Image (cartoon, helix red, strand yellow):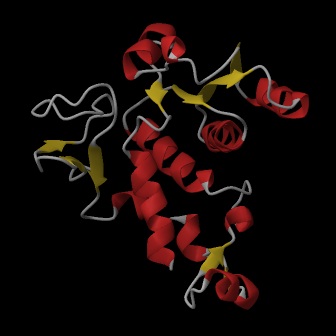
Amino acid sequence: MENLRLECAKCGRQYPYRPDLFTCTGCNSPGFTNLLLRDPDGALQENDEFEQRKTPCYKIPELNAALGIDGLFIKDETFNRFGTMKDRRSAEITRLAQHFGFSRIFCVTVGNLGNSLAEFARKSGIECAAVAPSDIPKKILARLGKKTTLTKVETLFDPSQAWTAKKICEVFPGAMDGTGNNPCAAHAYAQIAEDL
């Protein structure tokens, strides 16, 4: 994983991969991720269970006809180990957390990400901390409460409660950020497109 790097989507500046770098220091983009993870050696795909079991794609003629599109497919990510497209990103983030010696991963979730990340983290001996809104179904909250160190909040969409990388470091010191702030998220989702 020595050749992992981060590349600014705006100016193209490159950095060696660091788990705590989410925005380009050259562009000083305000508070959101603008870095893309580059993995020239395919280090994150080593022994990748997703390569062994690509999820199926279905063409639905009725949907194609209704939309006037001939090449639309639906990719069924529920065939992944924990039933969600979030499994790919959870696997990558957990691999990086192990490599960099983190003992805890943090995420903001309404269910799928928290469940997936908790399962991959548990397999790797890493604790998972999650923040979830208190108004999601009780069954999901109960499941997250069993698998993670769960913090319930009133809403995730109030800007005053935004879970920025800085806030994560303050509330969960020493935890790797497994939220959408992490450039791993976009990299893992790109793997879905490559499957197609």
Residue closest to the far right: 139
Q: Is residue 11 above or below residue 54?
A: above
Q: Is residue 175 left or right of residue 61?
A: left
Q: Is residue 83 left or right of residue 156?
A: right
Q: Give the residue at x 18% y 35%.
A: 24
Residue nearest the viewer, comparing 40 with 66: 66
Quadrant assignment, res 65: bottom right
* Location of residue 114 in the rendering, given as x and y in whole percent from the top left corner: 67, 36
Q: Give the residue at x 68% y 55%.
A: 84
Q: Is residue 18 left or right of residue 48?
A: left
Note whether residue 102 is visible. Answer: yes
Quadrant assignment, res 116: top right
Q: Is residue 4 above or below residue 29?
A: below
Numbered-mark total? 0
* Location of residue 82 in the rendering, given as x and y in whole percent from the top left corner: 73, 53
Q: Give the residue at x 26% y 35%.
A: 18
Q: Is residue 28 left or right of residue 148?
A: left
Quadrant assignment, res 183: top left
